[in-house]
Image: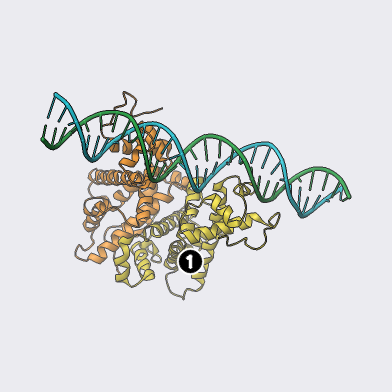
Chain colours: A orange, B yellow, C green, D cyan
Amino acid sequence: MQTAAAETRPYHHGDLRRALVEAGRHLLEAEGNADISLRAVAREAGVSPAAPYHHFRDKSELLDALALEGWDQLATEMRAALDADGAGSNRLVTMGVAYVNFARANPAIYRVMFACSLNHETMPEKLREEGAYKLVCETLIESGIDPDDEIGLELAAAAVWCAAHGVAEMVSLKEFEPLRNHLGGEDAFLRAIFSQLDLFRPASGRRVA
Amino acid sequence: MQTAAAETRPYHHGDLRRALVEAGRHLLEAEGNADISLRAVAREAGVSPAAPYHHFRDKSELLDALALEGWDQLATEMRAALDADGAGSNRLVTMGVAYVNFARANPAIYRVMFACSLNHETMPEKLREEGAYKLVCETLIESGIDPDDEIGLELAAAAVWCAAHGVAEMVSLKEFEPLRNHLGGEDAFLRAIFSQLDLFRPASGRRVA
DNA sequence: GGTGCATCTGATCATTGTCAAGATTGGCTT
DNA sequence: AAGCCAATCTTGACAATGATCAGATGCACC
């Protein structure tokens, strides 16, 4: 069943690169499995197994593209959560919850995102300039971190990100089901977890060494 | 180059299951890559590609066995770190650092451990009874959590584990290299990160809801 | 000593990532 | 408008992998 390119197969498929990325995203969402087969992506896009190689050197490059889109979406959703946030609430926690909610809602994509980062041993630069990382820094400054203490800021951002990632990956384990129920749903559960990591309380004393 | 079974190939290989697990661990350690090929494991053990199927239903079952060994080793190292810890130091942080050090020293094994857990959507039960999870709970109680507040304890343990896992996976990114150097090495870096997550400070006020 | 059964091998299949060579076609040059 | 170029897509192929099955092998037990 080809979802995307059913109609008339165009001789030279207008923008295959784009189509491949979207096919990949569909597969990731549908199967919920992070190890997509390149051939399956090509199939879904309605082209031959070798076609993708004219747009990506490698399977991993396709995954990189998928990861990039994921990071974009993540940043968008985090920003949206902050914007929708009532004044006076803990914005760091709100952001963390949004992060984890994204990871829970798109587990396959999230795994691809992180796997790519670990492969390259680095995260996409975009994050620092305009993406989620910058958002984290801004929110940290909002909540009392000294913006001029570059080391302190980076350390805090690292810690926050680590915590969010840890929660994102652990929280889908069944072990936490009872806890989640007891606390009354996903968001309350996540907020409780984050609250346990005191960093997420505004302006608690912090130290670098 | 077969490392393990070079000598004389015994007709019925004494304990192949064991040999396979060890071969797998060697490959994980050597290649540093988490996606071992079952065939490669068989090769390393000096048997045919089909032999493992008499001891494991599946490739994933071999990985499960490897994961289990990993969890054991982790618990051992965490316990050792606690035992070697000077009195008066922050034992939760010590434990967290040991956790992350293990993950950093055995990245492939750690990835297999966690991938297996995510596949089954649960962690091995052994952890709760006698493994790392129990250690975490004990140390939490030591550091002031009310042992009778079951919910609170479980929540705290969840938070601690999430944080440790997050740090373990993030910390190998190159982005943190300057930070690590600035703080004077791996352990100082990790302690700084953990210190940012205030939970790891003894007896800071905690709340459940 | 003989036999049953767990264990191991060999052959085989479908799938996958990747590549090289050939077909197709849109766009630019003149 | 004719024609060529280079990008794009397909076909066919290769090696490696996970998995299965029929058969060989030899240990333990009767």
Residue at the spot 59% in from the left edge and 48% down from the top edge: B49
Residues A170 and B136: in front is A170
Quadrant in which residue A104 is drawn: top left
Question: Which quadrant does the N terminus of chain A fall into?
Answer: top left
Could you tell me the amino acid type at mark 1? Glu
In this picture, is B188 found above or below A75? below
Mark 1, secondary structure of its residue: helix
Question: In this orientation, does residue A9 appear?
Answer: yes
In the visual, does A130 lie left or right of A52?
left
Q: Which residue does the numbered mark 1 point to in the structure image?
A: B142
In this picture, is A132 found above or below B80? above
Q: Chain of mark 1?
A: B
Question: Which quadrant does the C terminus of chain A fall into?
Answer: bottom left
Q: Please state the horizontal and vertical placement of residue B138, each as a whole percent of the image.
A: 51, 63
Q: Dot 1 surroundings within 10 Å: few (below 14), some, or many (20 or more)? A: some
Query: Farthest bottom residue?
Result: B86
Q: Please state the horizontal and vertical placement of residue A13, each as a whole percent of the image.
A: 28, 31
Residue at the spot 52% in from the left edge and 58% down from the top edge: B27
Q: Please state the horizontal and vertical placement of residue A34, each as a whole percent of the image.
A: 42, 43
Q: Please state the horizontal and vertical placement of residue B59, each as a whole percent of the image.
A: 55, 47
In this picture, is B192 found above or below A107? below
Residues B138 and A2: in front is A2
Quadrant in which residue A148 is drawn: bottom left
